[in-house]
Image: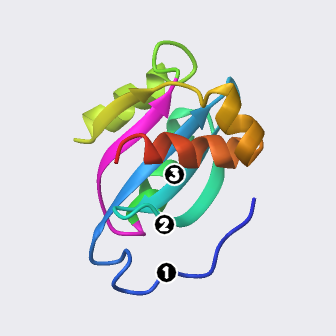
Amino acid sequence: MPHPAQPSQDDSANGEVVLGVDTHKDLHVAAVITALGALLCSKAFPATAAGYRQLLAWARTFGTLRRAGVECTGSYGAALARHLRAEGMQVIEVNQPDKATRRRRGKTDAIDAETAARAVL
């Protein structure tokens, strides 16, 4: 997955960031964006309890994390959503990107995770 250049201090480290997650049976792809919508990074994690802990620890390295947009909280994302809520996160269930957005931006799990984060803004 592409990893953009490190953000400036003003963009993230002391500010709020937002998490977005594209969920799947065996792995979840997460993206972290600034409160202004700039993509900081995306990364895949196993869909396991250990993977949820790794995902959250990784996302918190980018700044203050309070909100997450998660796809499919009723199925593949249910356990992750429970974990995030137990950690004090506000979890917003987001819909998968519509077909027009997918045609315009392309379809990758990283793009879907970024779109989930942007839905929270």
Indicate the amino acid at tag 1.
Answer: Pro
Labelled disc at residue 7: 1
Nearer the observer: mark 1 or 2; the answer is 2
- Which residue is more in the foreground, 45 or 31? 31
Mark closer to the chain start, 1 or 3? 1
Q: Callout 2: 10 Å neighbours few (<14), some, many (20+)?
A: some
Specify whether 103 is left or right of 24: right
Q: Where is residue 24 in the image (x, y as percent from the top left)?
A: 66, 27
Quadrant hosting residue 34: bottom left
Asked if the residues shown at circle 1 and circle 2 are in contact, with their CB atoms under 8 angstroms apart, the answer is yes
User: Which residue type does callout 3 highlight?
Assistant: Gln
Q: Report the Cα–Cα distance between label 1 and label 3.
A: 21 Å
Q: Which residue sits at x=77%, y=44%?
A: 106
Q: Which of 47 and 66 is in front in this view?
A: 66
Question: Can I make out residue 75 in this image?
Answer: yes
On the image, which quarter does residue 13 sit in?
Answer: bottom left
Q: Is residue 14 above or below residue 111?
A: below
Q: Residue 38 carries which label?
A: 2
Disc 2, disc 3: CB below 8 Å?
no
Q: Nearer the viewer, mark 1 or mark 3?
A: 1
User: Residues in magenta?
Assistant: 61-71
Residue displayed at 46% across by 60% down: 33
Tell me the kind of residue under disc 2: Ala
The residue at 34%/31% (across/down) is 92
Q: Nearer the viewer, residue 27 or 11?
A: 11
Q: Which of marks 2 and 3 is nearer the N terminus?
A: 2
Residue 51 lies left or right of residue 67; in this view the side is right
Residue 73 is situated, as x and y percent measured from the top left of the image, at: 46, 20
Nearest to the observer: residue 92 or residue 45: 92
Quadrant the N terminus occupies: bottom right
Distance from label 1 to label 2 (Cα)?
Answer: 9 Å
Q: Mark 3 points at which residue?
A: 54
